[in-house]
Image (cartoon, rainbow, N blue to C red):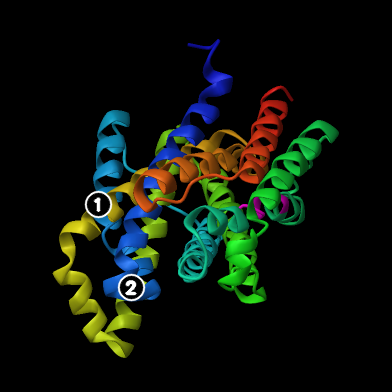
Amino acid sequence: MSLFAPFLWVVFTLAATLAQTYRNAAQRGLTGPLGAAGATYVRFLYGLPFALVFLALVCAAHGRLPPAPDAVAFAWAATGGMTQIIATALMLSAMRERSFVTTIAYTKTEPVQVALFGLAFLGERLGPMMAAAILIATAGVMIMSWPNAAQRAQGGAGLRPALLGVASGGFFALSAIGFRGAIMRLDDPGFVLRATTVLALGLALQTAVILVWLGLRDRAKLREIGVLWRPSMKAGFAGALASQFWFLSFALASAAAVRTLALVEVIWAQIASKKLFEQGASRREMIGMALIVAGVALLLNV
């Protein structure tokens, strides 16, 4: 077991990208009836029950209650939770203006931003090899995201979708830093319990904010979300499962390493796009994916 322990974060991250790709597809299907905002709310409102189940199971396995967060851990978790809501809303708004694959690609400028935020807020420094891995993989993402002639003709080259995607990546970066900060702050020897506790805490905070907001501003939307509970449960479960794996990864490795490896999600998104949305991959997108793979391979050899 000790031989494979250093690579556990890799396994968790790959599992998270698969679950997140399914969650993104499920949420995209809900943007029609619910809009981008409604589809954003779903992953949190319907994810919390599953997160609580995860926490109950982990507590039972450890034979103890979850660690109580202090003010600093709570602040980190709140930062992660609120910025994740904003990031998801921006991503779904961008998806309505561009193809599924290229929108995901724009958000994946995130690793560079994670590295900068990680250095600024957590003191996580990068070595030359890891910095090179991040830049190579991100270059692959940007090559994939460059609009082709058809996308330019349809407005795909506009500034608005690009800004939405990049801004989404920035807020996802802040979210990753916030959640890792909370996980590392908790006082418990078990990384699984710390990660699962932060997941439940983060989703509880997010759900509370969303329910208050909808109760005050858009009760009709809340009713619509309740009516569409079947597809929403799928998105909620996939979101909670993906977050569980993300948090396990954050407990074991730096946010920059985790989010760089997570760029393989662009490849899963390409597969999902071809099967679910009938959008194939161009030669340029294939080159971009090759660079992503090269960057990830370098990362894993650091």
Q: Left or right: 236 with respect to 260?
A: left
Quadrant in the rendering for residue 10: top right
Disc 2 residue type? Gly
**Magenta stretch in the rendered image:** 108-112
Q: What is the number of the mark on residue 234? A: 1
Q: Left or right: 94 with respect to 293?
A: left
Q: Position of residue 107 (x, y in %)?
A: 59, 57
> Does 302 sit above or below residue 28?
above
> Does 215 sit above or below residue 109?
below
Disc 1 residue type? Lys
| Residue at 35% over, 82% down | 213
Residue at the bottom extreme, as displayed:
217
Q: Is residue 48 in the magenta section?
A: no
Q: Position of residue 50 (x, y in %)?
A: 26, 49
The residue labelled by disc 2 is: 38
Q: Left or right: 50 with respect to 119?
A: left
